[in-house]
Image: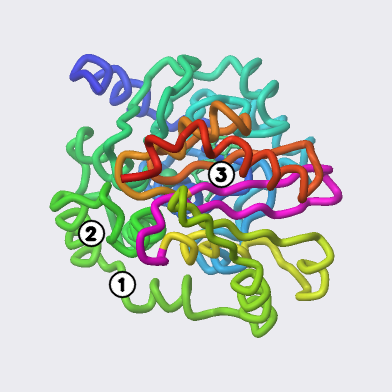
Amino acid sequence: MTEHNIKAIKALLSAPKHIVIVPHKNPDGDAMGSTLGLYHYLAKHNHNATVIAPNDYPEFLKWLPGHEHVVIHESDREKAEQLIIQADVIFTLDFNALHRSGAMEMPLENAMATKIMIDHHQQPDGYAHYMYSDVTMSSTCEMVYNFINMLHDTAHIDSTVATCLYTGILTDTGSFRFPSTTSTTHLIAANLIDKGADHSEIYNAIYDTNSFERLQLLGVALKNLKILPEYRTAYITLSQEELNAANFRKGDTEGFVNYGLSIKNIIFAAIFIEHKQEGIIKISFRSKGDFSANEFSRDNFGGGGHTNAAGGKSDLGLNETVEKFISILPSYKHNLTL
Ligand code: 5GP
Ligand code: MN
């Protein structure tokens, strides 16, 4: 972000404003951590800020400070859209195209507010007045820290802001193990701990709050795991029936796809999850090294994301989707084999 833009944003935020902060649909730890972190920061400067999420988010994030004030567009449409119309400024966090906000796309597109994007996904659209896009960043939470730093205002990061931002860095880096984690990521995490983020408590709140049913579902997913050694690929399927039998709750399948990638010599993993109600198969892709999950998803399953983590979907049935996936792999053979 240029010094010129930073100055303009500083001027824009110099007096209290009506501000809306939006994460992507099906918000994850980074989406909720970054929006709530920014929310608390802006509230400290007397702005009237609201986080509006396109739809609900997992239970394991429902301890984040301020989560009880989040407006859910899907269930509170009128209130959400009134806030969007009235907003002076709209921050869109952790997504690169307005359609990633689901049914909020048109209200956001039509909004008169000044739009500011903070995001680390590849190939961002140019809808925002001010764009802070950097695909090398570990997480949007790291970028929100940088954004506050660019405003020369890290003194206003208190333990509440720090807790939210640390959470998204933790989840988007896979607990600091993905290649996007840099020494700067660690330095920022250290600063956030100094400012009051309790790393051990945050880890516990995110990862050690499983329900019994979730672990049963993980057992089913691991039983369904298949490998295609010739393509160094692994995949998992979960049918609606299997989800129902395990009393599936939003977020229960988070992280399952990584088990495929944990197998020796596997560099590409996918999970196919049936959503009968939406009539789609939601897919997550993960990769190691140079193989681009983003391009694979973009080219074949109408999605996108990052080099090593992307999502997409399919309108075909579960079996047909897997058949399509397997039939595509040969054309990527030279990228998937040694
Ligand atoms: P996940 O597999 O955990 O849902 O998502 C992995 C990454 O890809 C995240 O950064 C997420 O924002 C992005 N992503 C997930 N689904 C989609 C999608 O349908 N379209 C695009 N463009 N990105 C997605
Ligand atoms: Mn993210």
Disc 1 marks a residue whose amino acid type is: His
Of residues 110 and 13, the one nearer the viewer is 110
Residue 51 is marked as 3
Give the Cα distance between marks 1 and 2.
Answer: 9 Å
Q: Looking at the picture, does residue 278 appear above or below residue 215?
A: above
Q: Residues within 10 Å of mark 3 (few under 14, many from 20)?
A: many
What residue is at 41 percent from the left and 66 percent from the top? 263
- Considering the numbered disc 2 on the image, is that residue within a helix, a strand or a loop? helix
Disc 3 marks a residue whose amino acid type is: Val
Does the beta carbon of the residue at mark 1 sit less than 8 Å from ligand 2?
no
Contact (Cβ within 8 Å) of mark 1 with mark 2: yes
What residue is at 65 percent from the left and 32 percent from the top? 83
- Considering the numbered disc 3 on the image, is that residue within a helix, a strand or a loop? strand
As drawn, is 86 to the left or to the right of 129?
right
Q: Which residue is mark 2?
A: 189
As drawn, is 287 to the left or to the right of 142?
right
For the magenta stretch, what is the residue range?
Answer: 262-285
Q: Which residue is mark 1?
A: 199
**Location of residue 68 (image quadrant):** bottom right
